[in-house]
Image (tube, rainbow, N blue to C red):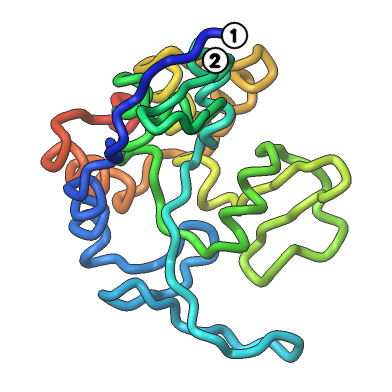
Amino acid sequence: MLLLTLPTSSLFAISAKQSLQDLYATSRITFFCEQPFSETGILQPIAHPYQAMLPETVHWMHIVPLKQLARDYACYQQKCVNKKGKIFKGLHCCKQHDVLFQRMIKDLHNLVPETKQLKQQRAHSVFAEFSNSSSPSNRCQLFLDKKRRRLEPPPSKRGMIARTYLYMKDTYPFTLSAEETALYWQWHQRYPVTPAERERNEKIFALQGRKNHYVQ
């Protein structure tokens, strides 16, 4: 297995975090359930009879998860080693070695604020549309099928999700199956671009110089 020599310093730029803070400075709510968070990233607690009211910090979630983005990159199948002899593989190797992958994971079009719990659930599930006969996973029309690892997002989020997937497919070495492409084209057409989505697209263009061409 090929070992790639890596620098010891992190390649994640602080400016990327600042860009995210700037992007959501006037609309500090999480993606799925629109839960408010403060300027310092502290989420406003939601009362629940079985959950302690503990402070939680907002996380940044990739709409298209990193593992799905990485599968078409050679670095995902390789092992890397830094100057101290520590071995990395998979996502760690891509994050620290592949320049295009580093740029892709910092693309603001694919990053949204979310709670830690929903970020983890999303990372281990695929988006789908299925029967809503069961109770939602929470109070925001979000349905989770844990057994089949499928996540049905609220109708209000499906259009933006679809346009993000289609944008990422066109912009980076990232492929979608025929089934995925059909679903996201359907969502793109069924759920039109909202004024908030259009405003976000313009802000991202000002911050990173690239628009999502599906947001018209």
Residues packed near mark 1 inside 10 Å, few (<14), some (14 to 19) or many (20 plus): few
Across and down, in percent, residue 198 comes to: 27, 43
Tell me the element at label 2. loop
Residue closer to the observer: 129 or 71: 71
At horizontal 85% and vertical 40% (from top left) the residue drawn is 148
Mark 2 belongs to which amino acid? Gln
Mark 1 belongs to which amino acid? Met
Compared across the picture, whether 192 is left or right of 68 comes to left
Q: Is residue 89 above or below residue 155?
A: above
Q: Is residue 2 above or below residue 67?
A: above
Across and down, in percent, residue 115 comes to: 52, 64
Residue 104 appears in view? no
At horizontal 45% and vertical 29% (from top left) the residue drawn is 85
At horizontal 62% and vertical 53% (from top left) the residue drawn is 120
Q: Which sits earlier in the primary sequence, circle 2 or circle 1? A: 1
Across and down, in percent, residue 101 comes to: 37, 23
Say which quarter of the image contains residue 6: top left
User: What label sits on residue 1 in the rendered view?
Assistant: 1
User: What label sits on residue 78 in the rendered view?
Assistant: 2
Q: Are marks 2 and 1 in contact (CB under 8 Å)?
A: yes
Q: Is residue 61 above or below residue 215?
A: below
Compared across the picture, whether 151 is left or right of 44 comes to right
Q: CA distance from mark 2 to mark 1?
A: 7 Å
Say which quarter of the image contains residue 8: top left
Across and down, in percent, residue 200 comes to: 26, 48
Residues packed near mark 2 inside 10 Å, few (<14), some (14 to 19) or many (20 plus): some
Residue 47 appears in view? yes
Q: Quadrant of the C terminus?
A: top left
Q: Is residue 150 above or below residue 56?
A: above
At horizontal 66% and vertical 61% (from top left) the residue drawn is 141
